[in-house]
Image (cartoon, rainbow, N blue to C red):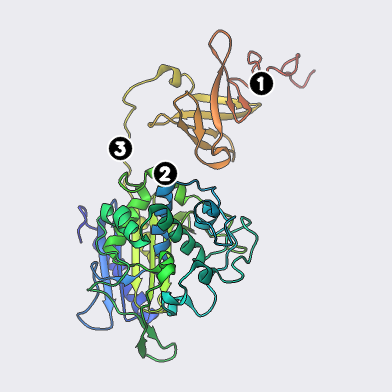
């Protein structure tokens, strides 16, 4: 354990019990897990069917589709550098695929309508040489849903994104990944091929306590969808990056963009959604982000909670059995609930902007009262004071306006409208007018509305 503040013994006991139960009931040869709190590994534990040979934070496992998140980061880097736009059709950068009308955004968020898998034989159990060209990956009927109409998970979609990275960088996906993500984040135990020490993949018989080894194929063109091997230590470094960003790899605002929902969920799935290379699930009142992964012989899950600043990784070397997604979510919950995050001390703003301070307090849309509050970063929070309504936070812009960050007003502009004498007349929020008094007579819009003004029952 390498945390500056150790977890309580009761918390550590609960974490170990959850991991031990998962290995035993899931009937997996081994299972390793680790939890990170406030950027430091707070706990790690493992169980194995071989006494004295438990895996640790340096033991590699295949991580399957967690690989997709790495590929998504590479694509977002291309966007931030101006080499592509997320709304660009694939054809603009990777011509000749027969699905060139799909946008980069649709591929990242699995909303392009592509099939979930390649044509037979099963790509996870066959060498990449079976599909030497993108046409072999896509097959004769690559599209099975209308493009842009909803979420449908697609492994071939991330093969296309990996090929897009290679085309624009002029290097292999693996080399770009190493240079642009793995090295800057210090993830030297994350590799396309296994490096000792690593776990072997196993299939466990569903009706008997026996097992047999699973092959580990090189996935070829499908590598950007699921090739990587990694460790709990490396994946927790990656989780910290996905929660906060890192200027060496991808700025915080772009990572936040990846975490936002990209398409409506599949029918019946109202507890989870998908961003740009990231899964999101609701667990009670907590949002968990990350990704799960599987390949023959391996199961893996990475979840993190931005609000709690807690992340968990669970890796297993069985084709099926342990529910790594559930276990990882439980580990986050155990730590976050038993030892909740201690908030930073309240501190006043370093300086006072009198003009901004004068804008705080109540504002009225007609008769509905809202409150405007200044935030430490120069932004504002605007929310109704009674009942549910359209609350939002806004980012300050250089021109003196604010841009909405969430909810109904995401992307909308909040601005101060002044009268001819320079005094504040009203606030304009996406054409909605907010005045200092209900239907303020002195405001140009909407004004007092009725010449007779307010009145009581005796008219």
* Quadrant (top left, top right, bottom left, bottom right) of the N terminus: bottom left
The answer to whether residue 310 is left or right of residue 274 is left
Residue 80 has which mark?
2
Specify the quadrant of the image occupied by residue 327: bottom left
With respect to residue 115, does 249 lie above or below? Answer: above
* Of 105 and 16, the residue lying toward us: 105
Of 251 and 282, which appears nearest the observer? 251
Question: Where in the figure is residue 183, as x and y percent of width and height?
Answer: 26, 55
Give the residue pinned by disc 1: 439
For marks 2 and 1, the one nearer the N-term is 2
Could you tell me residue 288's position as x and y percent? 43, 57
* Residue for point 27% across, 68% down: 13
Above or below, 303 relative to 316: above
Task: State the SS at label 2.
Answer: helix
Is residue 129 toward the left or the right of residue 47 in the image? right
Circle 3 SS class: loop
Say whether residue 371 is visible: yes
Measuring from the top left, give residue 26's x and y in whole percent: 39, 79
The residue shown at (49%, 78%) is 122
The residue at which mark 3 appears reads as: 345
Is 171 displayed left or right of 286 in the figure? left
Q: Tell me how many marks there are.
A: 3
Identify the residue at horizontal 21%, vertical 53% (top origin): 5
């Amino acid at each position: 354990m390498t945390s500056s503040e150790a977890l309580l013994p009761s918390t550590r006991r609960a974490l170990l019990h959850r991991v031990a139960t998962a290995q035993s009931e899931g009937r997996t040869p081994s299972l390793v897990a680790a939890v990170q709190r406030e950027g430091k590994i707070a706990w790690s534990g493992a169980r194995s069917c071989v006494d004295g040979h438990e895996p640790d934070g340096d033991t590699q496992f295949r991580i399957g589709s967690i690989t997709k998140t790495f590929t998504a980061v590479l694509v977002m880097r291309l966007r931030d550098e101006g080499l592509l736009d997320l709304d660009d059709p694939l054809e603009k950068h990777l011509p000749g695929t027969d699905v060139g009308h799909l946008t980069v955004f649709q591929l990242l968020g699995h909303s392009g309508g592509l099939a979930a898998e390649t044509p037979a034989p099963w790509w996870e159990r066959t060498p990449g040489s079976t599909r030497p060209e993108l046409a072999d990956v896509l097959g004769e009927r690559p599209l099975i849903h209308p493009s842009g109409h909803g979420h449908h998970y697609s492994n071939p979609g991330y093969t296309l994104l990996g090929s897009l990275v290679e085309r624009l960088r002029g290097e292999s996906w693996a080399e770009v990944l190493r240079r642009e993500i793995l090295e800057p984040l210090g993830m030297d135990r994350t590799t396309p091929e296994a490096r000792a020490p690593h776990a072997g993949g196993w299939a466990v018989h569903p009706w008997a306590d026996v097992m047999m080894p699973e092959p580990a194929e090189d996935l070829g063109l499908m590598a950007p969808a699921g090739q990587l091997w990694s460790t709990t230590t490396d994946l927790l470094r990656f989780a910290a990056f996905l929660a906060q960003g890192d200027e060496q790899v991808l700025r915080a605002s772009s990572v936040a963009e990846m975490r936002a929902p990209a398409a409506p969920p599949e029918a019946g799935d109202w507890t989870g959604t998908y961003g740009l290379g990231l899964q999101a699930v609701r667990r009670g009142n907590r949002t968990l982000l990350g990704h799960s992964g599987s390949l023959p012989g391996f199961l893996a899950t990475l979840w993190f909670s931005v609000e709690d600043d807690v992340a968990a990784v669970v890796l297993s070397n069985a084709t099926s059995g342990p529910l790594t997604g559930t276990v990882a979510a439980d580990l986050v919950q155990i730590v976050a609930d038993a030892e909740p995050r201690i908030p930073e001390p309240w501190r006043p703003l370093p300086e006072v902007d009198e003009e901004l301070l004068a804008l705080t307090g109540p504002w009225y849309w007609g008769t509905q009262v809202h409150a405007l509050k200044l935030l430490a970063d120069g932004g504002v929070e605007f929310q109704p004071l009674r009942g549910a309504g359209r609350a939002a936070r806004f980012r300050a812009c250089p021109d003196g306006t604010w841009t909405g960050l969430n909810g109904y007003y995401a992307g909308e502009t909040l601005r101060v409208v002044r009268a001819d004498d320079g005094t504040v007349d009203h606030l304009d929020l996406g054409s909605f007018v907010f005045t200092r008094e209900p239907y303020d007579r002195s405001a140009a819009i909407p004004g007092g509305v009725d010449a007779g003004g307010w009145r009581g029952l005796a008219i």
